[in-house]
Image (cartoon, rainbow, N blue to C red):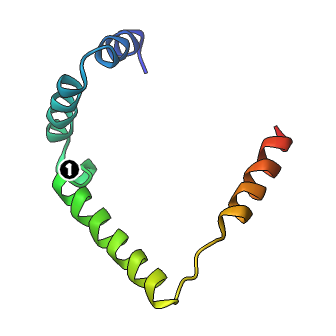
Amino acid sequence: MTLVAKKLAEQVLALPESDREKLLRLLRDSLPAETKTLSQEEWDEAWKKELEKRIEEMESGEDPGVPLETIWEDLRKLDKKR
């Protein structure tokens, strides 16, 4: 990233969230089609479907999940490695 881009990024990050969101959309829309990612609406829909799928798997017992205590133990182990 150039020095100009770094300074611009600092200024952009200091803007209110609504302005940053508008700039993000503007920049995303300026990219060539092959480099674009999903629109916000497409991301929202994709995550909604994924969450619905995960909830269904949990409720059906297909995916029993991970007990909270196991998660805490794993996090403690990771923290000790730091």
Quadrant where the C terminus sits is: top right
Residue 69 is left or right of residue 25, and the answer is right
Residue 75 is left or right of residue 23, and the answer is right
Q: Nearer the viewer, residue 75 or 28?
A: 75
Query: For mark 1, what is the residue?
Result: 40
Q: What residue is drawn where x is 27% and y is 49%?
A: 35
Q: Nearer the viewer, residue 17 or 58?
A: 58
Q: Nearer the viewer, residue 9 or 62?
A: 62
Image location (x, y in percent) of residue 36: 24, 49
Quadrant where the N terminus sits is: top left
Count of marks placed on residues: 1
Q: Quadrant of residue 52?
A: bottom left
Q: Is residue 36 above or below residue 58?
A: above
Image location (x, y in percent) of residue 50: 35, 71
Q: Is residue 57 above or below residue 48?
A: below
Secondary structure state at the residue bearing disc 1: helix
